[in-house]
Image (tube, rainbow, N blue to C red):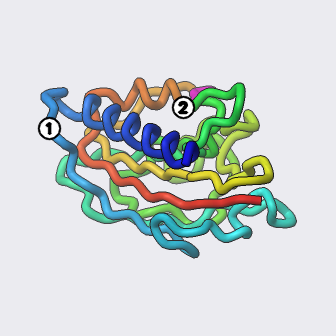
């Protein structure tokens, strides 16, 4: 029950932050993006092949989105563990961040390379392990953890250093969100 309470609070914080940071800051709710992730349904179990339990550790799943509004100049992505580990903060449980995904993109392929700069102009920041790119879910043994994927359609590209982390990305999103989508998954070991 505690896990569900933390998860609900995490979603409320994410939703509140997105709504407060939207274009114009006038409280209007951003348009929804429709997200799909290969291998699992929204709210379903994340397959082991996309996690640290895979041997070798799994790569990112294919992500698709639709519903980007006119004026979209880029996309940004945050993938994180919604259940805070003891002694950790929300920034400590970030598994993937990416920004300046081209406006023409309708998703990301499976197994995105773990490099800071991708050929299409996409930039990736550091994850929970302080490595660039995707790191699959890797909770401690026990109860399932709730993982949240957030994708944002933005009215500009973001000017962030290669060393940017989740807090930097979230700050840069302020006032630029045209649309957003959320997709959830569960994983436990």
Residue 83's image quarter?
A: top right
Q: Is residue 163 magenta?
A: yes
Q: Main secondary structure of the magenta part?
A: loop
**Residue farthest bottom in this picture:** 39
- Where does the image place residue 162, in percent across and percent down from the top left? 60, 30
Q: Is residue 118 above or below residue 54?
A: above
Magenta range: 162-166
- Where does the image place residue 3, in percent across and percent down from the top left? 57, 46
Residue 51's image quarter?
A: bottom right
Work out whether residue 78 can be spotted: yes
**Residue farthest right in this picture:** 55
**Mark 2 — residue?**
166
Work out whether residue 80 can be spotted: no
Question: Which residue: 39% across, 34% down?
Answer: 13
Question: Which residue: 30% across, 45% down?
Answer: 73
**Mark 1 — residue?**
28
Decide which of 105, 10 is in the foreground and name it: 10
- Where does the image place residue 172, in percent across and percent down from the top left? 40, 27
Q: Is residue 69 magenta?
A: no
């Amino acid at each position: 029950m505690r896990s569900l309470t933390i998860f609900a609070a995490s979603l409320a914080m994410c939703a509140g932050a997105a709504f407060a940071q939207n274009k114009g800051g006038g409280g209007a709710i951003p348009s929804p993006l429709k997200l799909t992730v290969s291998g699992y349904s929204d709210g379903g179990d994340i397959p082991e092949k996309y996690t640290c339990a895979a041997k070798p550790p799994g790569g990112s799943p294919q992500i698709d989105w639709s519903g980007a509004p006119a004026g979209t100049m880029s996309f940004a992505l945050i993938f994180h563990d919604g259940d805070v580990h003891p002694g950790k903060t929300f920034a400590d449980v970030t598994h993937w961040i990416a920004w300046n995904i081209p406006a023409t993109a309708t998703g990301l392929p499976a197994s995105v390379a773990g490099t800071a700069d991708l050929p299409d102009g996409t930039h990736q920041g550091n994850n929970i392990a302080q490595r660039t790119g995707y790191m699959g879910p890797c909770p401690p043994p026990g109860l399932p953890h709730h993982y949240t994927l957030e994708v944002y359609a933005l009215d500009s590209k973001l000017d962030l250093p290669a060393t940017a982390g989740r807090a930097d990305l979230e700050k840069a999103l302020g006032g630029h969100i045209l649309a957003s989508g959320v997709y959830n998954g569960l994983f436990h070991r």
